[in-house]
Structures are given as C-alpha cells and as structure tokens.
Amino acid sequence: MTMLEDRSTTNAKLNSKVPTGALADKWDTFKANAKLVNPNNKRKFKVIVVGTGLAGASAAATLAELGYQVDAFTFHDSARRAHSIAAQGGINAAKNYQGDGDSVSRLFTDTIKGGDFRSREGNVYRLAQVSVNIIDQMVAQGVPFAREYGGLLDNRSFGGAQVSRTFYARGQTGQQLLLGAYQQLSRQIGSGGVRLFNRCELVDIVVIDGRAAGIVTRDLLTGQVTSHAAHAVVLATGGYGNVYFLSTNAMNCNVTAAWRAHRRGAYFANPCYTQIHPTCIPQADETQSKLTLMSESLRNDGRVWVPKNADETRPAHQIPDEDRDYYLERLYPSYGNLAPRDISSRAAKRLVDKGQGVGPLKNGVYLDFSAAINRLGRNVVEERYGNLFEMYERIAGENPYEVPMRIYPATHYTMGGLWVDYELQTTIPGLYAAGEANFSDHGANRLGASALMQGLADGYFVLPYTISNGLAPLLNKSVPGTDHPEFKRVEAEARDRYQAYLNVKGTRSPDYFHRELGKIIWDYCGMERDRNGLEKAISEIPALYDEFKKDLRVTGTGEGVNQTLEKAGRVDDFFQLGMLMCKDALTREESAGGHFRVEYQTAEGEAQRDDENFCHVAAWEWTGDANNATRHEEQLSFETLQLATRSYK
Amino acid sequence: MSHTLKNLTVKVWRQDGPTAKGDFETHVIDSITDEASFLEMLDVLNERLISQGKEAVVFDHDCREGICGTCSLMINGQAHGPQRATTTCQLHMRSFKSNDTIVIEPWRAGAFPIVKDLMVDRSAFDRIVESGGYITSPTGGAPDANLIPVPKPVADAAMDSAACIGCGACVAACPNGAANLFVGAKIAHLNLLPQGQAERYKRAEAMVDTMDEHFGSCTNHGECSAACPKEISLDVIALMNKDYRSAKFKNRKELSRN
C-alpha cells in the first residue's frame, strides 16, 4: 500500500451546507430559512430513531411532541439503559452563572481549541449557543442538578477550560440526564406518540433511489428479521470504542448501525480520532471484560503523581514529596492536573513505559486526595466524590481516603463517526446521525463534559429543526413501503448473514476474536501510532478476520435469545471498522488531539499538526471491501480563530 | 494483592423459554482470580460452554459499572449477591472463598417473567413510568434554569431518590413481589422538586394504580431497601403513600363525575 493510492478526492457529496454569514448568525439564518411542516401535516411523516441514549431519546421525544409519528428502537430491554447513563462528571453550558468570564464564544473557542482545530466551526458555534437551552430544558424535566445553599445551580470546572461551566448531579450526571430524556420519551410512549421496539437491533439500512427508505432489524428475543419504512431515519447509536475490546464502553456498545449505514453509502469520517480517557482503573487481570472510568472531575481535587525513582518500593504515603513527580503540574503549570485528556493520557503512558508506574502490575499512576482532604476536610471530599470513592473501593479493593487511587488511560470516546453536514444529515439523504455516532463537533479531541452537551444539543435543539427542512419537500409524495423488493432483498441478506455465523461451526467464540482484534488495535492504533505499527495492523487484521470467517463458533440457534450470535455480528463489523481506523490513522500524517503519530511531534513531545496538508476531515467511502475504501476530504476553514498550536503549559 | 480461588461449584438456572421447565446446571470452576468480577466469572464459564459446543448461559448485563441497571441475578438467594450497595456487575470474586458453592438464579417475581436462563422481562417498570413518571415539559418552552431556586436539601433528597437504577432487585427481594420502592423512588424524586408540583397528585395516583396492575402489595418487610444497590430509603414509600392518599381526596370532585 502506498500513499499515492490513498490520495484523496474532493467530492460533491461533502457539502457541509453551513449557512453563510457571521459565525454568530449562522444558526439563526438557518432557522429563519428552514422549510417547515405545518402541525397538521406532521402526522403524515414517520421518523425512525435508532438508539435511546441522550441523543436518541431526546430526538424521539421532541419529534413526537411536534407531531411526527416516531418509531424508536433499542437493543436494550428498556430505553433507560443506554450508555449515556454512565457519564459521571457533568455537562458544559455557557450560562456564565458563576460570572467568571464565560460566554458562548468562549465555550466555542475552548471546544475548537480542545479539538485541535479539526472540527467544523459552524457546528461547534451552534453547539455552544444551544448549550444554554439544554440546562433550562433538563432542569424543567426535573434533573436534580447540584445546588448552592441559596437554591441556585452549582458549577464545577473541568479539563481544558479556565471557567466553571460544568453542571453536575453528584457523580451521576449522565444517569440523571438520561433519565430526564427517558421520562420525556416515556410520556410520548404512554400517549402513543412513540412506538418503542425494545430488544430489537438494527442490522441494515435500506436505501432506495439514493434515499434512506428505512431499516431492517433483528428481534433479539425471537431472531425474527423485519423491515421498517420511514420518511427519515436517525441513527443515535453511539460510538465504536469497543473495537478495542477493553474500553470504558458498556459491553453491548457496538458500531453495527453506523457501519451498516457506511456500507450502504454513508461516508465514515475521521475514524482514527479516538479518545483515551486519562482516569480509569488499571487492568487487574486477564479475565478483565471492561475498564471502569473514574470521573475526570476527580482531577479538580486530586493530584497526579508517580515516584521519581522507577525502583521505588515504599507505599505511597511513605514517599516524601521530594521523591514524587507531580508531572502534570510540572509540565503544564497553568492547567496542572486539569490538562486536557489526550495530553494527560500520553504523559501517564510515557512514565509507565519508563517503569515509573505504580500498583502490583506497575501499570498505573497515583491520583492522590490527601492534600484535598487536609485542605477541605474529609466531609467536603466525600460530598463531592463519595460515590466515586466507593466505586473505586468496590473494584480495586483499596480505600482512596487512605491510599491514593491508581489510574491509567483507557479508550473512552470516539470523535470519529458518520460524516454529517450542518443539518446532521449523512451522505445518504434522509439518513441522519446524532450524538457520538456522528463526527461533527469534537474534532480530534473532545473536552470533558461535552459529550452529554452534544448528545442533547443534537436531539433536542438541532434535529427537530433540520428534519423538518428535509421532510417538507416530501409532503404528499409517496415513499417506498416495506413491500418494496429492496426491503425484501436486504432482509434476506441479513438473514443469510446471521445464518452464516451459525454455519461456520469452527472452534473459537466471538469474544476470542474480539479480544485478539482489540489487542492489535490498542497496540498499533491506540494512544500512540506510527507508520510501522499501522502497516503491521493493516496486515494482521485481515489475517485474523479470515480466521474469524473460518473458525468462528456460535452455539445455539438463530431463533430465540442467542447472545453469542448477537456478538458475532458486532465483532464482524468491528473487524471492518478496525481496518478503516488503521488506514485513516496511517494516511493522516500529522498528530492532532487523540491521534498521536510518533513521527509528528515537537521537541517537547507534543502533538504536531500539519495545517497545510491535513486541515481537513477525512471522509471514507465504502467500495465493497474494507481494505479499499476511498478517502475524500472536507476542507476546514476558521473564520474567527487563528490556527494555533495548542498550549496548556 | 490478588489471590486465586480454587474449586468453585456454580449451580446456575437454565430455562429455555418463558413456559419451558427449568433446572439447575452444575459446573465446577477449577480456578479463578479474585480480581475477576462475578460476571467475568460467568464470561469464563460461557467461554468454556462454547468451547464444548454448548449454549452459553443467557444473562442481562451492559455497563458493568453499576449504573445502567441491566444486570440482575439472585446469588445464593440474595438479589445482587452478598455485598451491601453493590450490583452484580460490581461484585468481585474476592467476596467468595475457595470451595464455595454459588447458586445463581434469575430475579424471582411474578411480574418479571423469565425470558431465558437468567434473563427476565422487566418491562412492567417502563409501563409505570409511562403512566406518569415524568414532568410534562415539552422541548423549547423551559424558563431559565435559575428561575426556580431549589433548596439544597430538597435537591439532595430528590437526588437520593433519583439514584434508582431500575434493576428490579427490590421486587426480587420482596416476599410479595411488590414494586413500592421503585415507584416510591420515582414519585419522591419528582414530587419533592418544585418543578414536579403541577402534576404531583395525578402522578402519584397514575403510577400507583399502574403498579397495582402488575405487582404485589407492600407489607413493610423492608427487604427491598436492604437489597437496593443504591440504598434507596424506605422513606420514599411513606411519601408515595401520603401523596397517593392525598390524591384520592384532591381528585374526588373529578372522580365523582366518572
């Protein structure tokens, strides 16, 4: 494989459709000009929403409130289980309730800068604008955000920002926001505005005459494959971090919906932009099935350090300050322990690689609260982080009030995803992507407490406007129903695919292959990447994938519940995505945010962007083979900000 | 420091479908590290079953960090096992000893029919929330978030109740299969907050009535709260009962018209 073959092409499909005019006016301009569907006509349109996390639940509920017929799908038993629920720390909004200098434009600047100038300016500005509406909406839904004694909302600060703009509900902000959206969705289910299909997994997208016509699903209780037609389809199906096998994602998070859309013509953007979260509990043993994140908010009061001496044997509390390296405070004095995620993660990796790691496997760094406990008292620390400390003790078997926590980076979030335009529409007309499933707002690195913000922004305040703009021209025009031969063809393909997994009758389980694939991707396309490693991955993955096709063993049948079969389908798609990730990482010959190419770094070891050649979104087109995707580029331009090297020193 | 557990006998409930006859299947786990979580122990068992050409044990699980509420399991007769305030996914094998026998069953409750093996159907919970477990506030019309001050103790108490993860341990632990703790928690969360006042009594009435269609009656055993991984207090049931009773008085005028 040479670089020349991968030279990009520009493509008419990659029209971002960002309105012209000043940045601050673009969203208003869009709304002022968007086509509307009158209230009586809305019920003539059906919208499918796949996924019931923050983006999916808020979109489904809002679209139903507006009067559209909505069918919502989740593979969980209940709409309340989506992995948005696990977000701990908080949600950003430019409310400036603390009067500390925050504003829409500052949140915009922080997000662009945090994303290392690889996100689309217009989308990010809109995100910052609607952030304030989200807090209003969620408080109205009854989300019990933390309060000051006077009854007003409290805020905390978070990595990558110098203001306190993060709203939180103890260490369970994601849970409380998701329950708010779930309850709003439940109200619509109760009143008949939304039909919910639970334990039902999307297995393909149906495109007829170049437009999304609906989806094909597999009922996880019966194995039945069914078609669903609609005027528009929204994928709010989350990220693909589980490609690494070990990640902070829930066990069932997968890329299938986005990947199947990609195979049907939706471009996949920047798959190599993955985020490694700096504060997770290190792997303890070989049976480990997932990694648990400890909220980044802990870095507000915890100090990160390692022993200066790699041969250190004393327990943490016996190591005096002069023998400790508080390396974040040393390297990044102005942000200190709150340096952005990618920077903190790489700093930890370098010290662990140098042998300065702590814990039985020397695979972590300390996050120490003793100074905070001395300064604030144990009560205050317990009030802020009590549930996180308990969680740590349950998992690690150590008490963090007495012994410093041990943390290490783990895959956490994926900035890449389906390419979408300003209207969140993919390159397949009628198919939209929201939340982590799309690529749009975080560039090469997402700031803490911004995932919840983006999911809810997309679902509550963007999609409802942009979908009407897309649907209005379809009024009183007929769209294909599920009796269309294309639906039957795609259904048959899906049935055959699942039957094929059962038919291999090899010797290895889907989990075996997933674990092996994850190791390759983590080693060569994880925290640090280089050409040799990526080329190695690109040769090793197809070999393992061939073995998967020949030696997979799925026990049981295709009828009734079969979790092994579900897993086989998801691992299949991870293989193909994994190839594309490595290819994307190889062709992006620069370092940016979460994508750190060893070859492209400054003398101090910081990421070195190449704005001349790579200030663009890489959007990949499926050509029938994961090995031969075509790379397209959407150029990024910055009207108000100067491209600058990130510095958190 | 990690240790290795030897010779665990695992008796796990297998049942092909809702109406099939079920039975315990016995497996011996020769050795496993005590750093493994309980569900990772089941992963190891399932890998072995698949390698033997047998069907893996079906069980619900997802986040594996104690927040999504998907996992369940009666472990040696206790919902979520022996550790206080801990979901099955966060229970670790260090809670067990070598040579232990571990009995694993699905949630046992009439309102949660078995789907397969250890997986049950908890959708009755969703029906209750759909009947009134929300604040009606359509998108777009919300006033500024700081317009309604919420006293800190009120916000804290609402948060205590809102911490419920909807796992169903309360129902499984209850000798009557009652859902009062789950429903009480949601009613307390919303009825304590100023934003929830407009629908307070309608909510209590609708949710309790829907609950009664599916679940048994509460007789104040308190097993629910003892089993709750989020330690929801029994106080929420008192608040629910108080609001339900008030609702019956407040709505009398309306009821008499029916």
Image: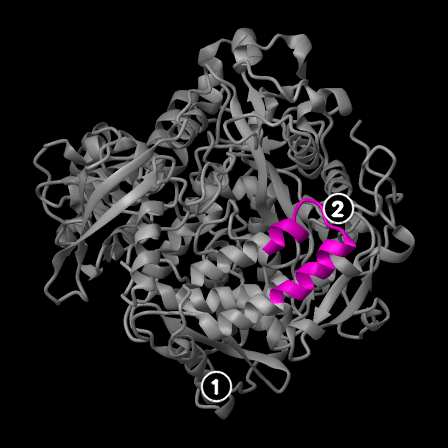
Magenta span contains residue A532: yes
Task: Kindly identify which residue carries mark 2.
Answer: A596
Q: Position of residue A427 (x, y in %)?
A: 68, 72
Q: Residue furthest right?
A: A612
Residue B211 horizontal side relative to residue A358, left or right? left
Res A487 label = 1
Please state which of residues B101 and B79 is positioned toward the viewer in this rendering.
Answer: B101
Local crowd at mark 2 within 10 Å, few (<14), some, or many (≥20)? many
Q: Amino acid at mark 1?
A: Phe
Sequence-earlier tag: 2 or 1: 1
Q: Amino acid at mark 2?
A: Phe
Q: Residue at x 56, y 66 (%)?
A: A544
User: What is the CA distance from the residue labelled 2 to the residue labelled 1?
Assistant: 42 Å
Res B23 label = none
Please state which of residues A558 and A507 is positioned toward the viewer in this rendering.
Answer: A507
Decide: is A101 above or below B10.
above
Q: Position of residue B77 (x, y in %)?
A: 14, 40
Q: Position of residue A75 (x, y in %)?
A: 40, 62
Q: Position of residue B52 (x, y in %)?
A: 29, 64
Name the image quarter holding residue A74: bottom left
Local crowd at mark 1 within 10 Å, few (<14), some, or many (≥20)? many
Decide: is A489 above or below A400.
below
Range covered by the magenta-colored residues: A520-541
Query: Looking at the rendering, in which quadrant would you find the N terminus of chain A?
Result: bottom right
Please state which of residues A130 and A394 is positioned toward the viewer in this rendering.
Answer: A394
Name the image quarter holding residue B53: bottom left
Which element is circle 1 on?
A: helix
Q: Residue at x 69, y 30 (%)?
A: A354
**Res. B251 visible in picture:** no
Name the image quarter holding residue A252: bottom left
